[in-house]
Image: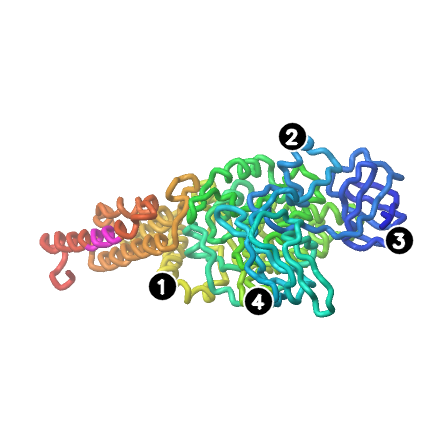
Amino acid sequence: MTKQIGRIETIAGPVVKCSGLPSVRMYEVVRVGNQQLIGEVIEVGDHEFTTQVYEETSGVAPGEPVISTGDSLSVELGPGLLGSIYDGIQRPLPTLRDMSGDFISRGLNVEGLDKTKKWSFTPSKAVGETVVPGDIIGEVPETGILKSKIMIPLGVSGEITEIVSKGDYTITDTICKVKGSHGDIHEVVMMQRTPVRVGRSFKDRVPMDTPLLTGQRVIDTFMPQAKGGTGAIPGGFGTGKTVTLHQFAKWADAQVVVYVGCGERGNEMTEALEEWPHLKDPKSGRPLMERTVLIANTSNMPVAAREASIYVAVTIAEYFRDQGYDVALMADSTSRWAEALREISGRLGQLPSEEGYPAYLGSRLAQFYERGGRVETLASDSRLGSITLCGAVSPPGGDFSEPVTQATLRIVKVFWALDKDLAARRFFPAINTLTSYSLYHSNLEKWHREHLGDDWPDLVKESLAILQKDQELREIVQLVGPDALPESERAVLEAARMIKEDFLTQSAIHEIDTYSPISKTYRMLRVIIGFTRKMTAAVKMGVQVRRILELSILDNIARMKIMPWDSFEEQMNAIEKKMEREFQSLFQELSESGFLSESLV
């Protein structure tokens, strides 16, 4: 097929107007200029079309050629994705560095997957079996943690006439032949190419009734995320968005993690690229990168590729979802992605909406978040997979009323609001429990009752009530001082202090406290609320809060967060018994001194 060639008319940064390709289509990939820069058609007219170029356009001049490829922006899916580090359009960064050094040259055409590496393929189907799109015909041990499942692509169904035996093959070798209903033969390879602008198909959505556990106590307790759910974490500069997302990505109860650094500072992405290969998966003990795909498109990279990066990321996530895996996708940050939309729309001369963002900002955000969910995948068997989407939002000055934050809040169901005052007090994670929320509590209540205890919902509600009361009392304390409060309200302040300092604060760099299993989180909360109930009862009996704060059990409670994961059950039981003994001893001592009556004891 002869390539069609057009010409450049005008250039405005990443936006290039071209002519001479009458059959060009929306979202078609073209090669722009003498250096053949990668671009995508975003506007088509009668005689001209507009392209957004994913590389720097300096030095490109009008009159240079534009070559049509006939393809949409697509990603290569197959063995080799896990552990990879890509740029915003799925070019492997290590390969780019090998080709051009530390500074990426323009016009490099690099394939997303290695076509020469051989993978050990084990078939799971036999000749004569009937298959439909999504059926698994074999698997490849891609890493020490996960096996990549090889699926029948869309448009292929029928009877298997040939399938290779167990052995080593490249991702472009034919491993299976399927005879269709009209007698046509389809050759199946391990690799698939999928356009990024449209979501991959599935059978149906299913209820989201299982939590995506993160190991972060404030999230798992008060603002839980469901597998397949959507969440946003907005906050001003320095409040800990990136650190919190890193924690989420490291420890979330997902089999695959896709992390896209969308327009973030280069040093933050560098930290992730340097740190993650040395982290160990808490379940398998293997390197965490073996179940992770990183997409790095930092703020100094071309702005148009930033706009494409989240579509590349979510398409990769959908591929693993279709294999039956639970996937967690972190986008840091959608504000930078929205800024890319604003810059491109401004150069196109589109009518701006609030704060210069395009009028379609909300619909584009919705299209992205709607690609999450828990679904029944395309296959003859019943297979469930999920994509949980979590996006950081960077509102200027921490103003949550700005357009990107408001548009996001209308879509997502979990809202983790980072508080600048908490961050200034070195409170991590700096999530404000009173302004944040999750709409998945009712969906997850059955799971929590079955796996933790029937008292879990009551413990959460009681904790939130204490924190709410503490907020109200803090305003009074600022006016009249703590000494003016009655003992019962001073007990509330102490209970809230324990919840905030001994439970909610969590160190991201501590070897043990960085990750809190949900069973440990439950026992910690039960101990703290148990102490609070006993303290409240003691105050009603006339005991001063000062005497209660002298109990040695408070030191044990403060150290609960650093108890080793493998022995905390035994230590928690010991703490609960010691707490019971010390309160009984306190009552007995006060009774013998005549401070309490026998009836009260």
Q: Secondary structure at mark 3?
A: loop
Where is mark 4, residue-wise? 205
Q: Secondary structure at mark 4?
A: strand
Residues at discs 2 and 1 in contact (Cβ within 8 Å): no
The image quadrant of residue 15 is top right
Sequence-wise, which precedes: disc 3 or disc 1?
3
Residue 211 percent across, percent down from the top left? 46, 59
Q: Could you tell me residue 118's position as x and y percent?
A: 60, 44
Q: Residue at label 1?
A: 458
Of the image marks 2 and 1, the number of the one nearer the N terminus: 2
Q: How is the image coloured?
A: rainbow
Q: Are marks 1 and 4 in contact (CB under 8 Å)?
A: no
Residues packed near mark 1 inside 10 Å, few (<14), some (14 to 19) or many (20 plus): few
Callout 1, which amino acid?
Asp
Q: In the image, which residues are magenta?
A: 573-580
Label 4 is placed on what type of residue?
Arg
Which secondary structure lies at badge 2?
loop
Label 3 sits on residue: 22
Residue where numbered disc 2 is placed: 102
Q: Give the mark, 1 or 4, whose residue is nearer the N terminus.
A: 4
Measured in 3D between alpha carbons, the distance from the residue under mark 3 to the one under mark 1, in whole angstroms, is 66 Å
Which is nearer the eye, 149 or 86?
A: 149
Q: Which mark is residue 369?
A: none
Q: Nearer the viewer, mark 3 or mark 1?
A: 3
Q: CA distance from mark 4 to mark 3?
A: 40 Å
In the foreground, 173 or 322: 173
Q: As shown in the figure, which amino acid type bears the numbered disc 3?
A: Pro
Instruction: Please name the predominant secondary structure of the magenta segment in the image.
Output: helix
